[in-house]
Image (tube, helix red, strand yellow):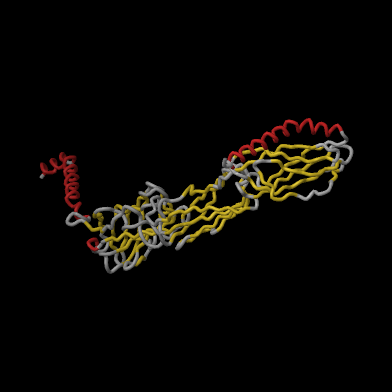
Amino acid sequence: MPVNKGEIMKKKSARISIVLMLLMVFSIPIASAATTTSSMLYVSSVTMDPAVLYPYEQGTVSVTLGNSGNQSVGLSNPNLISDTLTIDKKDSWNTMSYIASGSTITYSFIVSANPPDSSHFSLFSVETKDGDIFHYPILITVDSTDLMASISDAPSVYPLAIEKTVNLSIVNPRDGIIDNIFVTASGSGIKISPSEKYVSSLDAQSSVVVPFTVTPGQSTNLTFHISYQSGDVDHSTDVILPINIGNDKTAAVPVVNNIALTTKSSYYDLTGDITNTGITAAKGLTVTVGSPAEATGTYAEYAIGSLASDDSGSFEVTFSSSDLSSVPLLMLWKDSEGNDYRVTKMLNLGSASGSGGNSTALKTSGSTGMGSGGPQGMGGAPPGMGSTSLFSGSGSSGISSFYPVIAAGILVVVGIVLYTKRKWLTAKFKKQ
């Protein structure tokens, strides 16, 4: 008949378990018997490194005994009885060791844990010189669960060359502490700060958030390599975060309205309103003009300041230019992290030029947004915005469009004056 090795192992394990249970049951009376002599042994501490063992990996179990009696006690043959642990190495106690009254002695065992994952009782035992045996149960936990890591907070897209924050969350789901956690961040064409982060330890059932700042120069993958130790054994895991370049959906979006141009003798005066239709504030918002126009005069650069979402502010820019058909209006600001944003709006002011002192209201054609692309520090503009040309209205633009209204107002005033003076005028005519 063939031998079933599995059945043999099961029977052997069952026999060991029964022996352990019996020893644990009789451990108290045996210890009590030891106290009937001049010695009293007790366990002052049990340490395990690591506290929770991975299957097949080594750890150290240390048991410290104390002597509460009034005379020394001879001890020999320390041992661990377990169907979970394999003793790879133990301290050499070939001779009788004595523990003096009020002193302690520590026995250390280098062990390997056997699967499956669970908690098991092992039994520490040591013989006394008088032939008694001291027993003490030790709980051994075997767990193959690894450290867990994930991206807890990150943008869905990343503006080119704009610094953004990425949070890496590290969780220790084990029942024991893990040590020496190193996080190394890397990626092609991307700037990461810090490039490496160290966490000395992470308690059982706890977590930590590690922040990084990311400034991408291209679409790429950002890899977080996480190494850690359970005892003296190294472990590692990786988290990969795709970095996709796109428009910043949370950025400020300045929209220009109510543009008006006043022609002076040697320069032009441009006024208007800017409304922030984005989600976040535009901090330190300034307005000026770009080439071929040249900012000059009192308001070469106009500072609006911080413009919150859905808020608006007015500006006034003075400049000179030989070509009003293409005047770039530049808007520059910072976000809450200090990143620089720059948007250019092209204005067509050619039809607004005229004699000195004339003020012309300009109408916008189509959207009042600023170019395509996303907010940026190196070119581009906020999302959802198209190019705009501004032009003056024909025929009815300028002060001439108000002549009929002015004339009607004058006639009304004259009529009121004549009506109130009618008696005096009638008397004048009668005298004549």
Query: What's the residue at 69%, 50% (across, down)?
Result: 88
Which quadrant would residue 421 be assigned to in this image? Answer: top left
Q: Is residue 10 above or below residue 181?
A: above
The answer to whether residue 387 shows anywhere in this view is yes
In-image side of 382 versus 95 (left or right): left
**Viewer-proximal residue, 415 or 218?**
218
**Between residues 22 and 174, which one lies in front from this camera angle?**
22
**Image point (22%, 55%), residue name:** 399
- x, y percentage for residue 267? 31, 65
Residue 315 or residue 11, whichever sits in front: 11
Q: Is residue 285 visible?
A: no
Residue visible at 17% across and 56% down? 395
In x, y percent, where is residue 158?
Answer: 41, 55
The part of the image, by quadrant, that contains residue 135 is top right
Q: How many marks?
A: 0
- Counting from the top left corner in percent of width and height, residue 196 is at 56, 58
Quadrant the N terminus occupies: top right
